[in-house]
Amino acid sequence: MASMTFDLQWKESMVELLDQLELWDPDSTDQAKEAVATADKAEQFQQYATLYIRYLQIFRKLEESYDQTVHPQKRMDVRKTLEGVMGRLLEVKEKLIALKEVNFVNLDDVLVDLKLTPDVLEVPVPKFFLEDQAHLLAEREKYLEVLLKEAGIQPKPPPGAAGGFDTMTLESAIRVVQLNERGRQGRARAKFMKEIRWNEDRERRLLAQGGEGTEPEQAALFVQRRWRGYLSRRATVAMRAEELVFISMAPSEPKPLEKDPKVKELEIKKRRKLIQAQHEQEYRDDLVKQKDEVYETEGPDMREEMMDQLRDWYIKYREREGEFPSFPPDEEEEPTAEELAAAAAAAGGKDAKKAPDAKKDAKKGKDAPVEEVPPPPAYFVDALQDSFQEWTDKWQHRDDAHNFAQKHDVALVKQMVRPDVELKVRAEVNAAIEKELNNLREAYERDLKAKKAKGAKKGKKGKKGKKGKKGKKVKPPKRPKDPTGDKPIEVLYRQLVFEGICQKVDKVHLKDMIGSFEFLGAARDKLAEADSTKLPDPSIAQVVGAVTEFCVLPIGSQAVKNHAPLNMSTIGSKDGTPKPKCGTPVLIVGAPGTGKKMLVNAVCNETGANLFNLTPSNTDGKYPGKKAYDMVHTVFKVAKALAPSVVWIDEVDAVFKSGKVKGATGEPPNRIMKQLTAVLSPKKGLGVLDPEDRVLIIGTSSTPYATEKAKDVQAFKDFFSKILMAPLPTYSSRLMLWCGLIEKHGVKQYDFDEIQTLATVSAFYSTGSIAAVVANTLTQRRVERLARKPFQVSELLGPLAKQEPIAQPTDQALRAWYHGTVPACNKGGGEAEAAPAKDAGKKKK
């Protein structure tokens, strides 16, 4: 039943995908391209926004189908389509960003037109990023824990804990024990005195009533009264619960553990993953088996057919040329540019000689006509069309009703291994034909020698063919010396762990970033078109979506990393054409406590990436002086070998400050600037990273406006492919954040009206401050006492007052600097926007 359900879902996704490719996608057909070219900017944005939402829906369906399907061959094809949809989604997102000239695009008005809810815009993270390497990740985590223990590095405090682990002196511990003991003795004595007073009052009442004769009757009446009251209250509570259940306003009763649907779902998932692994292993084993079987059964026929073809070829060649060909035939050399020019001149005659030379015209200053080169076709459009064609040929009309266990198809396995068998047979046939040709050539030469000995006339010598001119050899770029030598990766990894550069990742995920959707983003965008200072801040949901698209998907999938538009940059390009860029650096700016570090750790957790910390404060005192090059080289070499990897640089603005810092002690923060800049160029770089490597550089900064020199500011901005802003939470986000954190710490009942007031009071407080307040208030001891002392929202006010809010000048400086990086805000004068940021930064100092 489940296989049929997800087969139908896969089919629906492929049909929807075909509709997008044939009707709506502007990059798929010539007709759609013409329609987009004639439309204005608003219509183009509307079309690409609709296309983006449709691809998101297909993405979600395909991801679920891949996760639930157990048929190994179907999973391969679903994954191929899924990666194509992921890449196409990023291509469409880049089109939207280019049209709006902002990194955060608001699509709330498009959702209203399509009658969809905001949860449609949530970008899912494919589960196979972690499941495909689950065993490797478990082993790596154990090994990292062993290395950290050997290095004496203490484990990190749990997320949300303020101040980490408590350290206490012996005197403080004795003082705490004394206070608790005195309190215990005081409570015991108070209880003892309370019992004495109660006995005295009882004896006094008995004497006033004249004896003990009526005491049993009064006791019975007292017990009856209490018992009847208890029964009445219990009946009232039961009636009220039944009424709430009847009107569907009461939560369902907790089910026993064995009947809990969540537990059952986890068991089914575990069983499904085991079946997937088992079927995958059977499929791989059968690939080897069927390859041998096809070689034994079909190999002789293939060999005979190939031998006949090659024999027929060299016999015709012998009849035509008078000699046997060389085997294997020499590859034809590609004609050089000079040969092409000579051929064109010979073909065109005098007119061709008069053709203008583009280089000479450029030197003379002539305005030579430049042909417009059409943009290259979208890579993932072709990949999706191929995937659809493959699905049509294989699965559209296939009946799998008999395959109840959903195991692999043997016929498809034979079809897959047949090209490999043909290559193997081809190699054997080539060796046999080469040997046969050598024998024939030797026999032919013997016959010629015999004829010459009898006095046969010598034939005229044929003219020697001119050798083709070889093109100039391109010298490989000079690479700097490898400072690591021949050290194995295990040794380098251990060295980085002991230095504290390779760190353990905090257990946080993107779903832990709580925030609301921006419902009025499109309306605020219209205001920003008239006044760029009114550009709306991105919502937390948009930040999470952008991090998923720009960080998680590229390093999670190799296909997306190789061909996504994020992997290209115009930096260092003289003609403005995009070129491959290593590392795909992303910058996240925001006030302290807005979740920058949490996002970095979440990216590592969602993709199973290693975390390398190159923050200046973390590397101070390590690799001193000129050894900074050794540090950067080692980090990127290990990151490449253990990909996927994330290289995190906090306080990254200090790295791009040129010159010496007055009064600074220790290593200068900018000592790795040259090495980081060189990493982006695969030709002139360190010689370690390639554009295909799944290594991501993430920079975070709370004071990006600290760089004051114009050349430093430009180098800082140009280094990063994407610049994202983590804003302060809005009222709706703070409301969701307070409620979510309180419930996460074990409190299910609280006054929602007071939470609304608290959300208003906590304006200009960061997400980290709010999380620290809840963690400091709802400790484990406080949660254990909830039954005796219910939680009051007012308990959060005291810890909140101790937190430091974000100053308004700091927030304005961050916003002004970020607006200076947004093209939409710099149409009339980009440099004018950077001035407020510098002034605000100086005021802060």
Image (cartoon, rainbow, N blue to C red):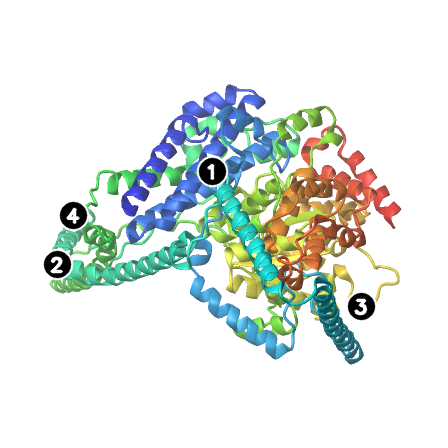
Residue 590, horizontal then vertical, whole percent: 71, 47
Relative vertical location of residue 546 with respect to residue 17 in this rendering, above or below = below
Q: Amino acid at mark 4?
A: Lys
Residue 809 at x, y = what percent? 83, 42
In the rendered image, which quarter is residue 482 located in? bottom right
* Residue position marked by numbered label 4 in the rendering: 316
Measured from the top left, where is residue 319 in percent x and y? Answer: 15, 48
Comes first in the chain, label 2 or label 1: 1
Q: Earlier in the sequence, mark 2 or mark 3?
A: 2
Mark nearer the viewer, 3 or 1: 1
Give the amino acid at mark 1. Ser
Residue matched to label 1: 248
Mark 2–mark 1 distance (CA, rounded to whole Å): 67 Å
Badge 4 crowding class, 10 Å Cα cut-off, few under 14, some 14 to 19, many 20 or more, is few
Q: For marks 4 and 2, give the one nearer the viewer.
A: 2
Q: Which label was assigned to residue 286?
A: none
